[in-house]
Image (cartoon, rainbow, N blue to C red):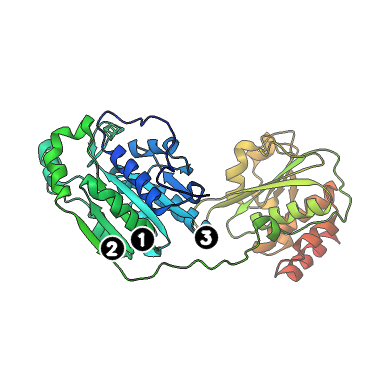
């Protein structure tokens, strides 16, 4: 495509800002900068997020992406890394000073990575969309007026991003300088940030003097550091990496069944659920598995659910499990509220109490803890139940453990339970 000064990067939509809003100046300046740089609009990716600055995406006749508040630098960085191998693509992200406060870490991460992109910060010293609250970039003078946190200095984004490694970091204020500054930023290979003072007439008019303080504080900081190059590594997609499981066995079960394995951390309940799910696939079934455990490591319950069905499993919840395999007290305490009389409840002999027997007379009591050591009790118990209930062939389970580094130990446990 041939571009010239008539090419516009803007749609014909009316700017949605309040009358006199400074954001329009930066948007028009960017349009002019792109015209002078002769970019193809299809090569420009404009990223925005929440806030008044986030209203811009319908205004641009380029690619546009809209993200969460404070996340346009992170979103832009991801896109920039994705298009780094493509010639002439340019990512330009917008953010307000409120978003920049919320997403400061993302800005610094983008700066230190120094990937080729430009971030435009529209700084009006306040959160405009929510009614003029102060941001992390509000100056102390500004805060004197409202007598709030007036001793707390604002973040200096230009100093911070420069210190983090941004190739080109500029605070610019005079409207007639914004276009040329943006041109330089866009032409800079690496991370560039342009903080532009942007008047908010609706909430910031009375703070003109304080905005002027920012205006007077123009700053240009540059590094010679070259942009980080992205090396295209032909990484296979997750789908390509996934293991193909071919049907090798016939499943015993006739209709959808759900199993809960209830144990303790470190007892292998999650691994066993995974083995069962894979075994189900070897038997030609659709399967799902889910795990639940506390955030702590090595302590507390570990409960896993597995569903088998010949039909596609659209609902993966297990409201009324068909089988419970309970091997430890932690597991029992966790699943107790889900126990019901229609289920087959297989439970280790040490866990049975009179109350439990009274509530569930059909309990199936098995000495699971005597069948294997603590780490393999869940596998021994699952093997026992699979064998008894003829849900899946044991050979499918053996096949499923076959890729694990401890497969010999596991196969030994399975064999001992099934003799
Ligand atoms: S509230 Fe302020 S920043 Fe938001 S559109 Fe209106 S003038 Fe612009």
Which quadrant, please, contains the C terminus? bottom right
Q: Residue 87's mark?
A: 3
**Could you tell me residue 66's position as x and y percent?**
45, 41
| Left or right for 400, reference 157 | right
**Could you tell me residue 366's position as x and y percent?**
75, 51
**Mark with earlier residue (1, 3):** 3
Instruction: Determine the residue positioned at 79% across, 51% down.
Output: 281
Q: Are marks 1 and 3 in contact (CB under 8 Å)?
A: no
Q: Mark 2 points at which residue?
A: 162
Quadrant of residue 401 in the image? Answer: bottom right
Q: Residue 102's mark?
A: none
Instruction: Determine the residue positioned at 50% across, 51% down.
Output: 43
| Left or right for 297, reference 25 | right
Q: Which of 32 and 324 is in front in this view?
A: 32
Q: Is mark 3 on a helix, strand or loop?
A: loop
Work out how far the residue at label 2 is from the one at label 1, CA to CA, in angstroms.
8 Å
Q: Name the residue under label 1.
A: 111
């Amino acid at each position: 495509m041939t571009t010239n000064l008539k090419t516009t990067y803007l749609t014909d939509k009316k700017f949605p800002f309040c009358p006199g809003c400074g954001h329009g100046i930066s948007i028009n300046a960017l349009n002019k900068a792109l015209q002078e740089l002769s970019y193809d609009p299809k090569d420009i990716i404009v990223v925005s997020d929440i806030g008044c600055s986030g209203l811009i995406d319908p205004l641009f006749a380029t690619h546009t992406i809209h993200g969460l508040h404070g996340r346009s630098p992170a979103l832009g960085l991801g896109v920039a890394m994705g298009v780094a191998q493509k010639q002439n693509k340019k990512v330009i992200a917008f953010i307000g000073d409120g978003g920049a406060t919320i997403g400061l870490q993302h800005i610094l991460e983008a700066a230190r990575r120094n990937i080729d992109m430009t971030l435009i910060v529209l700084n009006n010293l306040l959160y405009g969309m929510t009614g003029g609250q102060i941001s992390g970039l509000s100056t102390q003078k500004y805060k004197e007026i409202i007598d709030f946190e007036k001793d707390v200095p604002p973040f200096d984004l230009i100093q911070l991003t420069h210190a983090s490694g941004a190739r080109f970091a500029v605070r610019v204020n005079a409207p007639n300088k914004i276009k040329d500054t943006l041109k330089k930023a866009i032409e800079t290979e690496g991370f560039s940030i342009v903080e532009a003072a942007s008047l908010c007439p609706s909430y910031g008019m009375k703070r003109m003097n304080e905005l002027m303080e920012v205006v007077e504080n123009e700053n240009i900081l540059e590094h010679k550091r070259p942009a980080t190059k992205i090396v295209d590594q032909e990484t296979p997609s997750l789908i390509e990496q996934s293991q193909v499981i071919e049907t090798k066995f016939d499943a015993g079960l006739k209709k959808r069944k759900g199993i809960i394995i209830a144990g303790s951390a470190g007892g292998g309940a999650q691994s066993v659920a995974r083995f069962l799910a894979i075994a189900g696939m070897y038997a030609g079934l659709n399967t799902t598995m889910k795990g639940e455990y506390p955030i702590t490591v090595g302590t507390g319950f570990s409960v896993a659910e597995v569903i088998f069905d010949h039909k596609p499993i659209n609902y993966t919840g297990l409201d009324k499990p068909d089988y419970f395999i309970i091997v430890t007290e932690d597991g029992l305490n966790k699943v107790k509220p889900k126990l019901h009389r229609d289920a087959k409840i297989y439970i280790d002999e040490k866990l049975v109490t009179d109350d439990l027997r009274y509530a569930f007379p059909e309990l199936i009591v098995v000495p699971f803890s005597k069948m294997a050591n603590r780490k393999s009790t869940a596998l021994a118990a699952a093997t026992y139940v699979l064998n008894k209930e003829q849900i899946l062939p044991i050979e499918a389970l053996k096949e499923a453990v076959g890729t694990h580094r401890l497969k010999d130990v596991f196969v030994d446990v399975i064999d001992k339970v099934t003799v």
